[in-house]
Amino acid sequence: MTQASILDHHADGFVQANGLRLHYEQWGDGPRVVIALHGTSLHGKVWYWLAEALGPEYRLIGLDQRSHGDSQRVGTGQYGVEHYCDDLAAFIDRMGYERVSLVGSSLGSRVALLYAARHPERVDTMALLDLSFEMPTAASEHMVQAHITRPREFADIEEAVAFSKTLPQRLRFTDEVHRRTLAGDLRATPSGRLEWRYERDAAIETLRCAARDMWDAVRAVRAPTVILRGADSDVLIASTVERLQQEFQGVRIVDVPNAGHSIWGDNPAFTAKAVVDALDRHSTASAIAPAA
């Protein structure tokens, strides 16, 4: 953690963008804007570990993507990467940001990749956590089954923590990471129980769209990019890494030790340092947000 992080300067808000009411978390108010995009079933609060590591020159925005967190729900057939990307584009315009850096994990990595390909003049730099396009079907179906079978409610946080420790993508999390992640995962129901803050059908459809070809987007990106890969990931596989090294202009690929797909929770200290190093290396004053 840096000595002067932005963690204590936290707020949240809503904006109307792309016809949806989108919710976001914000840490800090510095001139270097970083928009962080979570993975399937997660939320903007999950980026607390990155907020801990960023200095006061940064403004970190954790966007709740459609049908996740407190953002508006949508119906079936609206969970392709293009739908999420259109939300991001409208959100950036609505917030008035001229240039941003992007950090994306899993689903968020695909959305960031497509946005950077479509809007190269708007992206300062990118950090992609276990980039997940062309996800092997076995891996995505394993995640789908986890969503189908998981309970939707818990009696209390201890029951939720006990269940979280059984999830395949969270087996390496410490107790603290389980609890801090669940603080954003869950909300209280009127009866006092706890329920997930995402739509199960949205997660399933999103995962089943994850095997798509995005090589045209890879070749169109111009922003300096680092891809962090879980050393034990079953999602970003060796053949995809090899092709990325050949076709992704100027990319750096870094293996995160002691991590599977959820590298942000499996090894948050290593991941945070690698992301901050990438942002500090390439972020410039051109990412300054206009005065409110």
Image (tube, rainbow, N blue to C red):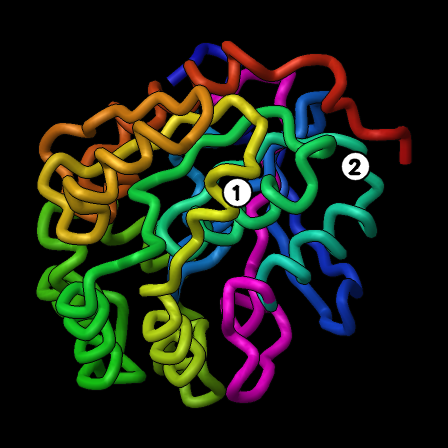
Residue linked to disc 1: 36
The span picked out in magenta is 54-82
Type of the residue with mark 1: Ala
- The reply, left or right, for residue 231 in relation to residue 11 is left
Residue at 44 percent across and 53 percent down: it is: 214
State whether residue 253 appears in this view.
yes
Return the x and y of residue 284 as percentages of the image width and height: 67, 13
Q: How many marks?
A: 2
Q: Could you tell me which quadrant the C terminus lies in?
A: top right
Using the rendered view, name the quadrant where residue 55 is placed.
top right
The answer to whether residue 80 is above or below residue 1 is below
Residue at 72 percent across and 23 percent down: it is: 287
Residue at 42 percent across and 14 percent down: it is: 277
Check if mark 2's residue and mark 1's residue have beta carbons within 8 Å. no
Q: Which mark is residue 105?
A: none
Return the x and y of residue 152 as percentages of the image width and height: 30, 84
**80 or 256: which is nearer to us?**
80
Marks 2 and 1, the one that precedes in the sequence? 1
Q: Which mark is residue 97?
A: 2
Label 2: how many Cα within 10 Å (few below 14, some 14–19, many 20+): some
Return the x and y of residue 133 as percentages of the image width and height: 35, 55
State whether residue 194 appears in this view.
no
Return the x and y of residue 187 as percentages of the image width and height: 44, 71
Using the rendered view, name the quadrant where residue 289 is placed.
top right
- The reply, left or right, for residue 262 in relation to residue 172 is right
Residues under labels 2 and 1: Cα distance?
14 Å
The answer to whether residue 159 is above or below residue 114 is below
